Image (cartoon, rainbow, N blue to C red):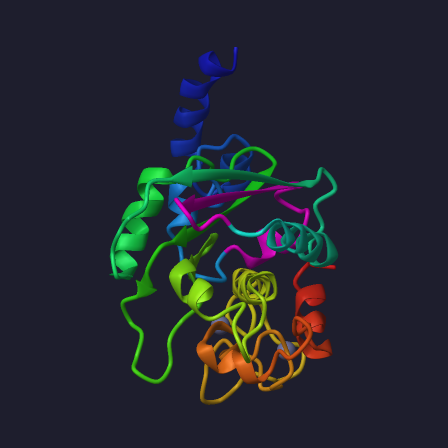
Amino acid sequence: MRKGLQGLVLTFGLAMLSFSCFVDRDRVVEDPFVGEPAARTGVGQLANQLLSADRFTRLEVEVVYMRGFRPTNQMMTEMVSFLEDYTHKPDGVIFREREIPAGGQQSYTVQELLDLEKEHRQRYNERNIMTVFLLVVDGYFSRDEEETFALGAAYQSSSMVLFGRRIAENSGILRRPGREMLETTVVLHELGHLMGLVNNGTDMVEDHEDEENEAHCDNSSCLMYWAVETNRVFGMMETSIPQLDQKCRDDIRANGGR
Ligand SMILES: [Zn+2]
Ligand SMILES: [Zn+2]
């Protein structure tokens, strides 16, 4: 019955383009928040949809890791509680995990990450379900510099990557955090970016963006401090995972989060 009506709606829609609510209600206009096109938008672009229950009431996290780089159970548990703490998802937060073959590359460019996602991501936003994709690769980031290297990154509106080899090489040894703590810290920071922090998809209640490192918090003990996703983090996480400070929490709440 719906199908039979579509032609009618379309004809009407064309004739009545100025009646935007009419067109919206009958979905002649494409929903900008579902499917692959929504996932191809920039970091922070789905912050409100991730934080609030207005559009999506359930959250699914798809974790895809290269052979030998499965994230720890602790990371996955902490990720769920972080999402439960800061987002409104009355129908739950769930995880799916899957192993993919090793890539075997020394490093990965953004384009290569996008290609891997295209090949391996199975879940995109649909109906009441918001999806987040986490890729764990067996190499480094191609943009690493000599002094500073990335442990992880958020690279699209619902996509994040962990550079598994960097994390493995820099944890569980002298003067380095344990692997669980390191990967958890990095993944929560990247989730913060998907939530639009700082001033990158979620407006600031009070100004606290780091002038020299955009999209980051100026509080050096906050989870959203720029150093958290790089090797500079080692000096700042002695015994625990950095938390979001009050200003970051205020932003999240003001954009529909908890
Ligand atoms: Zn960051
Ligand atoms: Zn902060």
Asked if residue 77 is among those painted magenta in the image, a careful observer would answer: no
- The structure residue drawn at horizontal position 57% and vertical position 52%, both measured from the top left corner, is 72
Q: Nearer the viewer, residue 83 or 108?
A: 108
- The structure residue drawn at horizontal position 67% and vertical position 56%, both measured from the top left corner, is 78
Q: Is residue 111 left or right of residue 90?
A: left
Q: Is residue 59 left or right of residue 246?
A: left
Asked if residue 48 is among those painted magenta in the image, a careful observer would answer: yes
Asked if residue 133 is positioned above or below residue 256 in the image, the reply reads: above
Count the marks: 0
Q: Nearer the viewer, residue 186 or 166?
A: 166
Q: Quadrant of ligand 2?
A: bottom right
Q: Nearer the viewer, residue 166 or 256?
A: 166
Q: Is residue 152 visible?
A: no
Q: Position of residue 163 (x, y in %)?
A: 40, 61
- The structure residue drawn at horizontal position 49% and vertical position 33%, both measured from the top left corner, is 27
Q: Is residue 29 visible?
A: yes
Which range is magenta? 46-70
Asked if residue 215 is positioned above or below residue 186 in the image, the reply reads: below
Q: Position of residue 68 (x, y in %)?
A: 42, 48
Residue placed furthest toward the bottom: 211
Asked if residue 122 is positioned above or below residue 206 in the image, the reply reads: above
Asked if residue 174 is positioned above or below residue 35 in the image, the reply reads: below
Q: Position of residue 231 (x, y in %)?
A: 45, 78
Q: Nearer the viewer, residue 141 or 250?
A: 141
